[in-house]
Image (cartoon, rainbow, N blue to C red):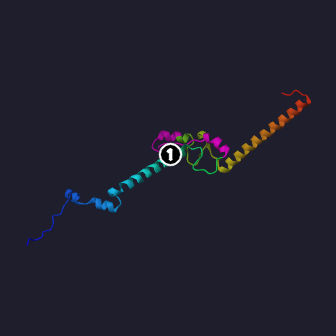
Amino acid sequence: MVRKRFQETKTGIEYLKSVDYDKYLRKAGLGKEDHYFWKQIGKALLCTYTLIGVVWVYNETSPLGWWTLKPKPKEERELAHLYERREFPYPGDAEAMEEFVAKGGMIGTTIGPKGTVETDKDSYNYQKQLQDKKFEQEAQKMWFRMRNEVIQELQEKGYDVE
């Protein structure tokens, strides 16, 4: 009777060739029969991330804001073109930093329309400004209406006005 000997251990490339990878991949759900499923998953992910990217780009230039359910007031939409995105200089660029600080980009200040520094801006003052502007517009409308009525009455009486 011939003695059984231990099998020689396979190392390196011999071992890699002898391993049945398909068996392990099948157990993990990555076998040959699962290729169609993962292809569909890949397509779905590609489409989803494409849509998210398009929405993200649209959000950067959107007149609506990000999924706003209540529309912006007319005054805010009219003033929106005055405000633009701030570009911060690279910290290592000394010349650009000096220019940024000179334009009013210092810490603790609010940058208003077209780069002017406004230290007293807050939401209460902004609302008050909008209310004052509305009040002035209504007063001007009323003044013109009264003026036109007086002119019309004078013209009816026979006076030559204007």
Name the spot of residue 107 as percent of width and height, x first: 55, 48
Residue at 32% from the left image edge and 56% from the top image edge: 32
The residue sitting at the left extreme is 1
152 with respect to 95 (left or right): right
Residue 64 included in the magenta stretch of the image: no
Seen from the viewer's position, the closer of residues 70 and 107 is 70
The residue sitting at the right extreme is 157
Seen from the viewer's position, the closer of residues 19 and 125 is 19
Residue at 32% from the left image edge and 60% from the top image edge: 26
Seen from the viewer's position, the closer of residues 81 and 157 is 157
Q: Which residue is mark 1?
A: 54
Residue at 53% from the left image edge and 41% from the top image edge: 100
134 with respect to 116 (left or right): right
Residue at 52% from the left image edge and 47% from the top image edge: 55
Identify the image quadrant of the N terminus.
bottom left
Question: Could you tell me which secondary element the residue under label 1 belongs to?
Answer: helix
Name the spot of residue 8 as percent of width and height, x first: 15, 64
104 with respect to 133 (left or right): left
Residue range corresponding to the magenta coloring: 73-99
Name the spot of residue 150 as percent of width and height, x first: 86, 34
Q: Where 161 sits versus 32, above or below?
A: above
Quarter of the figure with residue 23: bottom left
Quarter of the figure with residue 133: top right
150 with respect to 127 (left or right): right
The residue sitting at the bottom extreme is 1
Seen from the viewer's position, the closer of residues 32 and 45 is 32
Residue 74 included in the magenta stretch of the image: yes
| Dot 1 alpha-carbon crowd within 10 angstroms: few under 14, some 14 to 19, many 20 or more | few
What amino acid is found at the position of numbered circle 1 in the picture?
Val
Identify the image quadrant of the C terminus.
top right
